[in-house]
Image (tube, rainbow, N blue to C red):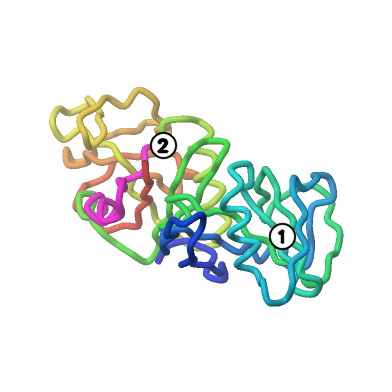
Amino acid sequence: MGFEADSLQRIFLASIILGEAISSQIEYIRMPGFEGYRPTDPNPIVIVHYTPEDGILSCCLACLQNENCHSYFWNTRDFTCEMYATRFDNNHTMSLEQKYGEQYYVKANRCEMAGFIWVNDLLFCFQIYTNSYRSHNESNLACSKTEGGRLARIDTNDKQNHVKITILSLNGVFGGFWIDGNDLAQEGVWKYSDGSPMTTTFWNTAQPSNKFGIENCASMRSSYGYLWNDRYCEDDINYICEIV
């Protein structure tokens, strides 16, 4: 299954704004990590007080109409809507103040709507699949079933470290994960699945080894600290997808 926050709650809107229909493609994701709390440092760009009859949808629609609004706090007790020009995550390091009855929502992007992990600093959208064992080619096909999906290209040191830390946070026992990359066309010439060259790699010492002359696909291997090794492409292991 994929690594995702199953407890995230979503709001789908079907309303009329300025005479134009707003469909269910508009989505907000509730972040339970801020339930009843908020960061103390930032200031809201807009504060609106609604009536109980207006409800949370009014706050949601107001944020939608404001191009500078990227998230909002909704207070279920006093019906206050506070809109922010930024987004916070569950690992936010700023101090928090308790605010009874508050819920936090962010505008969802295509990555989050697919249930993937969005890393804004890296502009990287990925998902780790565990207990879903496939060959390298089957893994790539599974990734492609999501619009814009493919096996993850780990092409920067920051991506390599972020994916490694995310895997370790799962506290599971994994043999390895398929990522994009192979030398099937020519031994030793590593390319991505679309034929473009792999210019940044994170091979473990003495890898790739092409053991027994049959290892032609790239994987992140747990026993190597999730550095890479080449592997027999038909092995059934877990995999990592990304959306581009």
User: Which residues fall within the magenta stretch?
Assistant: 139-153
Whether 195 is among the magenta residues is no
For residue 36, side relative to residue 132 (left or right): right
Whole-percent x and y of residue 23?
A: 41, 62
Q: Quadrant of residue 102?
A: bottom right
The amino acid at mark 2 is Ile
Whether 152 is among the magenta residues is yes
Looking at the image, the residue that sits furthest to the left is 185
Disc number placed over residue 205 in the picture, else none: none
- Structural crowding at the residue carrying mark 2, measured as other residues with C-alpha within 10 Å and reported as few (<14), some (14–19) or many (≥20): many
Foreground residue, 199 or 15?
15
Element assignment for label 1? strand
Q: Is residue 49 depicted above or below 127 in this figure?
A: below
Whole-percent x and y of residue 112?
A: 48, 55
Q: Earlier in the sequence, mark 2 or mark 1?
A: 1
- What residue is drawn where x is 57% and y is 53%? 64
Residue annotated with mark 2: 154
Where, quadrant-wise, is the N terminus in this rendering?
A: bottom left
- What residue is drawn where x is 38% and y is 50%? 240
Element assignment for label 2? loop
Residue annotated with mark 1: 73
Foreground residue, 61 or 30?
61
